[in-house]
Image (cartoon, rainbow, N blue to C red):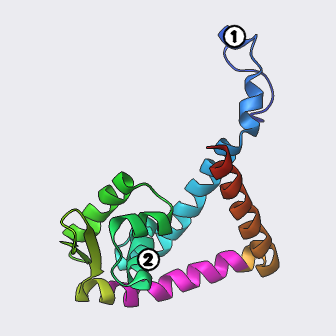
Amino acid sequence: MDPKKGNGHAKFESLKLTDCLDCVCYEVRKTARHVINYYDAALRDADLKSNQFLILVAVAYLKSPNFTKLADFVGIDQSTLARNLVTVEKQRLVSVKTGKNRREKLITLTKKGEHKIEKSFPLWKKAQGRLVGGIGAERWSEIQNELHGVVEVTKSLS
């Protein structure tokens, strides 16, 4: 079935709903779901979801960031980060403590979190290699540049 044929519900005949199927948001979200599911499956043996893995890696890379720095780095708002942190904090993979300023919260990896990265990194590496291999390294580099461009445009339009 070709989703771009027809116009769906008769009530909306005056609207060209097929235009929505060319929507940047629709395509990016659909692609993201497939990619996320792929990495989630790859990390299953480490008992991690891709968003949890990325948070652990970001915390390790940034060396105990605060909420703002971590949220900016992973590209999500602080409330979404807080929801995501609950899971890894319950698993005792990270520790969230008050910083010098009482309102500042610092996120650090626990020993268990460090071990989780060591266990999950080879799984991620294999998944990354397979996906980039399928896309092609040069093409992946071009896609990354294009995605960065889309981010910059959306920031400038906000």
Q: Which residue is mark 1?
A: 10
Vertical order, 71 against 29 (above or below): below
Quarter in which the N terminus is drawn: top right
Mark seen at residue 58? 2
**Residue 93's spot in the image, x, y percent?**
26, 78
Q: Count neighbours of disc 1 (C-alpha within 10 A) and say few if under 14, some if 14 to 19, many if 20 or more.
A: few
Q: What secondary structure is the stretch in magenta mostly built from?
A: helix
User: Horizontal placement of 92 versus 131: left or right?
Assistant: left
Range of residues picked out in magenta: 116-132
Which residue sits at x=31%, y=89%?
115
For this orientation, the residue located farthest to the front is 101
Disc 1 versus disc 2: nearer the observer: 2
- Verify whether residue 118 appears in magenta: yes
Quadrant of residue 2 within the rendered picture:
top right
Element class at badge 2: helix
**Which residue lies at the image location 73% right of the left edge and 24% below the top edge?**
17
Residue flagged by tag 1: what amino acid is it? Ala
